[in-house]
Every structure is written in structure tokens, then in C-alpha cells.
Image (cartoon, helix red, strand yellow):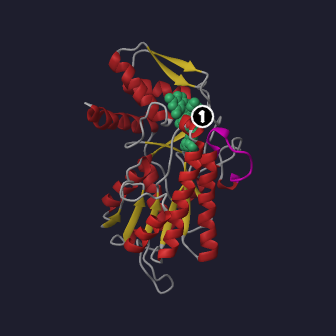
Amino acid sequence: MGTGTATAADPHPSFLADKDAKVFVAGHRGLVGSAILRRLLSLGFTSVVVRTHAELDLTRQADVEAFFAAERPRYVVLAAAKVGGIHANSTFPADFIAANLQIQTNVVDAALRCGSVRKLLFLGSSCIYPKFAPQPITEGALLSGPLEPTNEWYAVAKIAGIKMCQAYRIQHGLDAVSAMPTNLYGPHDNFHPENSHVLPALIRRFHEAKACGAPEVVVWGSGSPLREFLHVDDLADAVIFLMDQYSGLEHVNVGSGSEVTIKELAELVKEVVGFPGKLVWDSSKPDGTPRKLMDSSKIQGMGWKPKINLKEGLAETYKWYVENVISDKN
Ligand code: GFB
């Protein structure tokens, strides 16, 4: 546990008391990494290190080792990953398992070998849990049953990441912790029509339908699956909180605690975007797991709570989409 200041018993300052230390945020251009970067800068961290994919390919072990040896960061937040929605996960299983295993293995191992890293946080996903895990899903449900087939390749890689952090803690004493966020959304998301997650996909589809006066919008599946959504700025807060406060072996769930059906979500996006037409359901598309509500009582018990409700977060994300993605295309 971080105490804020260094003492004789704990010679290191806590993360939040060490704002001039080098912090490497891997994946700073993605949804999660960009939110963590914004939060670190707003908190006054002065030495955040980032690399674009073109500057450093995290799937290449030698390049990752050379980067860590040269930069010698004190803290690492591992938010770099190959991610996507239900369609991308089932279409590119090899890419999802290979890239994620490579990135996390290279980064965790290089963090140990360079000798400078005091703490590392690895980000996973709620899809690590069994398809039919009891709800809400506690951390203890890991590896207690079969996974959801549409994203098992990604899930297996993320489970390996948790286990790698645990193994490096046990064998080498590396302070590596893992956070498992629920379904995330917010600025800098991927708004690709097929490969994105449901929330950005629907923002784009409703916006384009409204812009061209289309009478209806197609939504995938039955509409009955339940999903829990968390704004990425809330996740960024949780990541900073865990970097400062948590040094346990077990991973930590990070969720909002409230869930909606996909039908309710679609109605909400329709309202926020202001699309006047109707919804049509494409039942040839998969539903995925029926429900995945996380039990976030562990992190809430430590003192973290989400702040952004879905409607507000959705409205703000739509505004960001219009100002950044649409205006970039014009
Ligand atoms: O967000 P999503 O792709 O991911 O889909 P998962 C959630 C639900 O929304 C599914 C439905 O029931 C989809 O069928 N859906 C409706 C849509 N319309 C659309 C659409 O236009 N696009 C998309 N993408 N979905 C992901 C995993 O599962 O969850 C990842 O694939 C990751 O690995 C992520 O773990 C958090 O929630 O089903």
C-alpha cells in the first residue's frame, strides 16, 4: 500500500507522491491509454514517456528490451493491446491471441530485466471470465468454466497476462498488478463500422443514418444481452488509484455496477444522436455472452467509485465524435 511519503519501513514514495518519476504509458493513442495519459498530465506528472506504434512495435522483443534499457522507466501502465468488438474478435482470432501475448510478454519481461521498474499495471478485460459465470462476477470466478467462444482467443491472452504478472511477482518480486475493466467507452474510441465495440458502432451508425435521412438503423443480435458500461475517464481514475494503493497478487475488477440491455443502449444512442427513425434487428449477428456484470466491491471497498453515468458519458462521447472524427473527415 502506498503511504504518500517514504518511511524507514517503506523507503519508496507512493505513486502519487512520485510525480517526477518516469512513467511509461504503453498504448497512449488508444481509448484507455489516452485517458490514462490525460489523467497523469492533469495530476502533474512531469515525465510521462510514450511511443507511437511506428516508433516502437511492442510485438518485437528486441525493440522493447532496447527501449526499456534506454528509458529505464520507474512505472509502467500496460494499456497497449489489440482490441475490437465481437465481430473483430471472431474474424481475426490469430491476430488477437498472437499480438496480445507478444505485447504483454515483451513488456512485462523487459520491465523486470531493465531493473528500474518499481510498479507495473496490466489491463485486461471482463471477457476473461467464464461465459456463464455467476453474476455479478467476482475476481474468484477466473478459470472456473468455459469462455465465450466469440472472444476466447483474446480472453486466453489476457488470462495469460494476469498469470504472467502473478508469476513475476512470485518468482522475481516484480510489483505487477492487473486491472480488469468492464466494457469501456469514451473519446478516442475506435468507431469502425464492423470492428468496433457496440457503443461507438451505434454512435456512428445512428449519426450517419440521421445525416443521410435513412428511415432505419440495423442493430446486431437480439438486443437482449446485458452489458455494463464504464466511461474510460472513470477507468483512468481507477488505474491511478491502483497504481498508488494496490500491490496484491489477485487482479481487480473495475466496473460501473450498472447494466443495460443492448436494446436499451440502442434506444439511448438513438435519443442522444437525435435519430428519428426506427431500429431493425439483424439476428444473423452473434449476441455473445448473455450477461457480464462485474462485482467491483473489491476496488470500491478500497475507496474508488465511478463518477460518470451512462447518459452523460454517451452525450459527451457523441460530442467528441462529431468534433473530432466527423470534422476530420471534412
Ligand atoms: O461491444 P461488443 O462487440 O462486445 O458487442 P462484447 C456487445 C453486444 O452488442 C453484442 C451487440 O450482443 C452485439 O451483438 N451489437 C449490436 C453490436 N449492434 C452492434 C454493432 O453494431 N457492433 C458491435 N460490435 N456489437 C467484447 C469482446 O465482447 O467485449 C472483447 O469481443 C472485449 O473481447 C469487450 O472483451 C469488452 O461485449 O460482446
Q: Nearer the viewer, residue 232 or 155?
A: 155
Secondary structure, mark 1, is strand
- Residue at horizontal 59%, vertical 53%? 158
Q: Nearer the viewer, residue 58 or 201?
A: 58
Asked if residue 265 is among those painted magenta in the image, a careful observer would answer: no
Residue 201: x and y in percent read: 45, 31
For residue 110, side relative to residue 203 (left or right): right
- In magenta, the rendered stretch is 141-152
34 lies above or below 207: below
Residue 278: x and y in percent read: 47, 15
Asked if residue 145 is among those painted magenta in the image, a careful observer would answer: yes
Residue 131 seen by the camera: yes
Residue 259 seen by the camera: no
**Amino acid found under the numbered disc labelled 1:** Leu
Residue placed furthest toward the top: 215
- Residue at horizontal 64%, vertical 68%? 167
The image quadrant where one finds ligand 1 is top right
For residue 324, side relative to residue 156 (left or right): left
- Residue at horizontal 59%, vertical 47%? 154
Q: Quadrant of residue 163?
A: bottom right
State the residue position of label 1.
226
